[in-house]
Amino acid sequence: MSKTSTADEQLDLRGTPCPLNFVRTKLKLDQMAAGALLEVWLDPGEPIEQVPDSLKMDGYSVEQIVPRGDYYAVRVRRPG
């Protein structure tokens, strides 16, 4: 799949503090099929600085981080 493909699921975590946004992202990914793509919306600052790195350390593939005005859209794929 290309990085521009449509996400299978979307998770809006704007306003959710660290580390709760990381925990909710992992819980959502665990409910998804292997290889599925999740788009997570995160606030600037600590969330966008911490969550993608934490996901990578846990073995997830962060495919894209796109600034969208006052938040970021992070595309992460569950390992297959």
Image (cartoon, grey):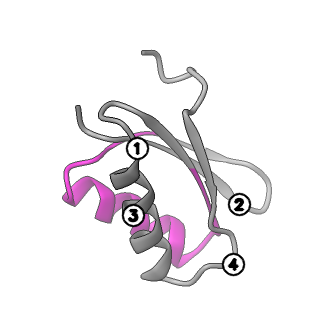
Amino acid type, mark 1:
Met
For label 3, the residue is 27
- Report helix, strand or loop for mark 3: helix
Q: Is residue 39 above or below residue 15?
A: above
- Report helix, strand or loop for mark 2: loop
Magenta residues (range):
40-63
N-terminal label among 1 and 3? 3
Indicate yes or no whether the magenta region holds residue 51: yes
Q: Residue at x 51, y 77 (%)?
A: 46
Tell us which disc is closer to us: 2 or 3: 3
Amino acid type, mark 2:
Tyr
- Report helix, strand or loop for mark 1: loop
N-terminal label among 2 and 3? 3
N-terminal label among 4 and 2? 4
Q: Residues within 10 Å of mark 4 (few under 14, many from 20)?
A: few
- Estimate the x, y position of residue 58 in percent, counting from the top left: 21, 58
Query: How far apart are the two marked residues, 1 and 2, measured between alpha carbons?
Result: 23 Å
For label 1, the residue is 32
- Estimate the x, y position of residue 16 in percent, counting from the top left: 61, 79
